[in-house]
Amino acid sequence: MNEMSNKWIGKNTIRPDGAEKVTGRAEYAADTTMPGMLWGKILRSPYPHATIKSIDTKKAESLPGVHAVATHDDSVDFPLDTPVILGIQDMRWMARNVLAKEKVLFHGHPIAAVAAKTEEIAQKACELIEVDYEVHDWAIEINDAIKDDAPILHDFIKFDGKPSNIAGTLEHKKGDIDKGFEEADVIIEKDFETAAVHQGYLENHACLVSVAPDDKTVIWSSSQGQFMVRAMTSFITGIPQSNIRAIPAEIGGGFGGKTIVYLEPVAAILSKKSGRPVKMMMTREEVMRASGPTSASKSTVKIGATKDGKIIAAKGVFYLQAGAFPGSPIRGAAGCCLAPYDIPNAHTLGYDVVSNRSKVAAYRAPGAPIGAYAVECVLDEIAESLNICPLEFRLKNAAKEGTKAVHGPTYPKMGYVETLEAALKNPHYKLPLKKCQGRGVASGFWFNAGGESCAQVNITEDGNVAVTTGHPDIGGSRASIANITAELLGIDINRVSVTIGDTASIGFSNLTGGSRVLFASALVVTESTKQVIDILKDRAAKIWNIDKEAIDWENGVAKPAGDNAGKFKPLTLAEIADQATPTGGPIGAGHQVNTVGAEGGFATHICDVEVDVELGIARILKYTAIQDVGKAIHPAYVEGQLQGGVVQGIGWALNEEYIYNDKGKLDNPGFLDYRIPVCSDLPMIDTVIVEVPNPKHPQGVRGVGEVPIVPPLAAIANAIYNAVGKRFYSLPMSPPKVLEGLEQK
Amino acid sequence: MTETQYLSPKTIDEAVNLYSKNQGQSKILAGGTDLLVQIRSGVLSPETIIDIKNIKEISEIKNNGEGSFTIGAAVSGASLEENEEFKDYWPGVLEALRLIGSEQIQGRASLGGNLCNASPAGDSVPALIASGATANVQGPNGKRNLPVEEIHAGPGKTNLKNDEILINFDFPTKEQGSADAYLRMIPRTEMDIAVVGCAVNITMDEDTCINARVALGAVAPTAVLVNEAAKLLIGTKLDNDVIEKAAKCCEDACNPINDKRGTIFYRKRVSGVLFKRALKIAVERAKR
């Protein structure tokens, strides 16, 4: 496709969901109601760790207004010794996270649920449920969970042959690490810590579920995947998937946190028991206490380089908290941390550690920021010790086409070097700095992803285009798909509308996550649209009574390929649609495939900070995010993704953290004391979009949303060091920590 | 579902009568920016809410001349902001009040509510104390006038009797060459709660400090009037060593805790820093 001739790809077209959202018409899960609807509430554990000896629901059931009470006994049993894998989740853990079975494993762990006439009655009934606990010691922090005499969360998890809270490991190896370090002229090894941080989506989890007497089930909910909701609800309730229709509501942010279920199966159980539709909404406090943050971590990174600035060996060990059940994103930490570099000898190792916290959920490039934070900080120290510009140092060691990555693949054409060159050229990098101001840089990588996607492209009777895909739109996929469809058909963007189908109206499409959606859905939409164009040509051929091969589709019309084909007035899409019935019927095509060919994305960030050394406050002065996105189908959305990722990274670096009290209870379950950045904390985040097209994708798409949260942690840490001459190895770099560190200097 | 009775008296006597009749079961509603949050989160469930915003004395701003004002307990931050004279005379009190919550909250949040909520971190409280304002309270047994620093008894507790209502604040006549200032430390830039707050009210005769009041918030169970720091400043030309000693007094006046918002070390150190910065602003304003 010729870049310059693009009419819609690469244009900032008006977002299709904009008007509905700004006028309050967009329907979110919390907006849904049904006649006869009940309200569901959840009873949560008051202890961080206890065995459930018994649950007595009699008093709750007899409270007037209560229609149903549910416990784990009402759900399908998943024996502990039999894994049931769904995507990256295991239904053994998912079912026990939704409603605790043998044990409660964190403060706020759901134990039972009530459906009642009002929320107040449901809440009151929850308080009437009597649970007999045997309370155990608990472990919140990684060091407490991995020490020899740590309280064990799950007896059946063994490590080194003994019961352990280490639930798994993952490692990548390349070359000979010992030999590499022997050849190094400079070796730096440091320990790092990061705190657990929440995705902080604006919209709390909510759903409405109706189970009819014949088990036909309808779910309206806020999620990143209606098919994930359908499958998990089916697993936990035993209702077959074919009986469940999951309708994706508009979504008020997810960032990975809505890739699993919390409420839907519970509401389904309550609905089935009560015979009424059941609505459930979490409070912000419930979201903070019991929905997934991402892991806290501790790590050690050791890197060796030769005196001429070549990285020759690198080792990283990462412990990531999984929360109550196995499954922390060690792959993101151990797999992404060295991906930007061409390193001959390397070893990365991740440990999955369970502890008495809420189960982690995916969060934007899961695990990758943790790994990059440690590696990119150590690289800054090596560059400093070798007296090389940190960008030149990275450039010298940059992975490129043909490099064998530490995590396995050999790279095709990719754009990491281009991000470094753009950073070096960017005027930001040369701006003068004042006292107590500093500049830091860091790079980052995310795999991106393919997977199952379906699309249906239909020509309407009036000659317009209705596209249906199966992925909730959390980052601009509808606008981008509209751009691509209009481009391929050669028609005006306003003639294309894109809808996210429910599970009954489109085939299985994997959830929105991993920066996969535009990559995958563009592939299936492109293929469907090509088929539609083929049909349109066929219909024109019938109308003109000539061969289909003698017809070209150009700028939205069918026309004879040349003079030999005959002289006909070109037929527009509308004209062909008008003749659809006599020429063979409705015009449309669908495509469904497991998409492959996703390629990674790289970014380099430049950050300036100013530190108030008397108060320990670091403020971001200027920030530039440079990223290879493959191809920006809708640049304003791409820019928004870059800015959003950076801002979440800034929060992670400076103030956000889960703080537990001495009872093992989260002490800051709200946005007052869990401090995500507010607008006035931030400068405008500048972006530079680099486009090195993914050679395995028709439009060159790589994926955008995850990479921008990977570099900020280290870029900010390096900038603070540059400003005050003191390195901080623990996040968040909150004012008390920074002031104390500065005093110890 | 529990039902709450809402009452909206038009006079102080009526309010006092209703409040004393429903002792223990009723709460006073001014702006409601703390009370309604506490009700929603289940911390409080009062049987009766007595809204005092419709009482003239409690909602009015009276300019008594020469910097003396009588400000109703329920006057909102946004309304006080519109009073140019008050802004000229008491910029420190106004800037403290204006730091509470968001723009929307400012349409309701009041000095009286901030004081009676009795959070050690209430922003306007140190500024009120530094200003030398007094509080007029009224109960069935009559009226009392107390210095603001005597209102707080501890976190969430005041020295008001169970049947007393805060009516308004009297601000003293402004001394020639005086000005006030308030600063707080928060990790973010807005929408946050003070980790440390410091108010300074200073009177300058040329380069000599002739009067001073210093108050700290969020560093002890109640806001603290730091007389020792003020004493050090009075009669000096505010040389650096005097300021440093006074800053040390502020650190020593702190009796903070380690909590999710800050450490003992941090709060002490920042008290001194904010004192120095607030003092500088107050002195600049006083000399203007």
Image (cartoon, rainbow, N blue to C red):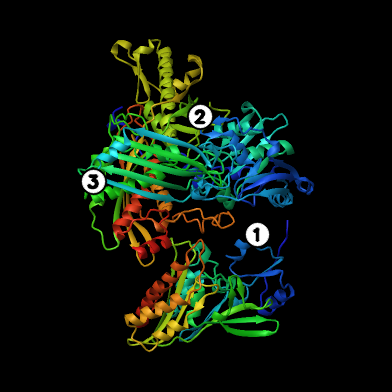
Sequence order check, earlier mark of 2 and 3: 3
Q: Residue at x 37, y 25 (%)?
A: A556
Secondary structure category for the residue under label 1: loop
Q: B83 and B218: which one is in front?
A: B218
- Residue A228 appears left or right of A172: right
Q: Are marks 2 and 1 in contact (CB under 8 Å)?
A: no
- Residue A125 position, x and y percent, is 73, 50
- Residue A485 position, x and y percent, is 41, 29
Instruction: Write down the residue under mark 3.
Output: A424
Q: A29 and A703: which one is in front?
A: A703
- Residue A687 showing in the rendered view: no
- Residue A516 position, x and y percent, is 43, 33
Instruction: Write down the residue under mark 2.
Output: A509
Q: Residue at x 67, y 85 (%)?
A: B142
- Residue A398 appears left or right of B236: left
Q: Quadrant of residue A370?
A: top left
Three-letter amino acid code of the residue under disc 1: Gly
Three-letter amino acid code of the residue under disc 3: Leu
Residue A331 in the image: above or below residue A662: above
Q: Chain of mark 1?
A: B
Q: A34 and A661: which one is in front?
A: A661
The residues tagged by marks 2 and 1 sit, at their Cα atoms, a distance apart of: 42 Å
Three-letter amino acid code of the residue under disc 2: Ser
- Residue A118 appears left or right of A183: right
Instruction: Write down the residue under mark 1.
Output: B42
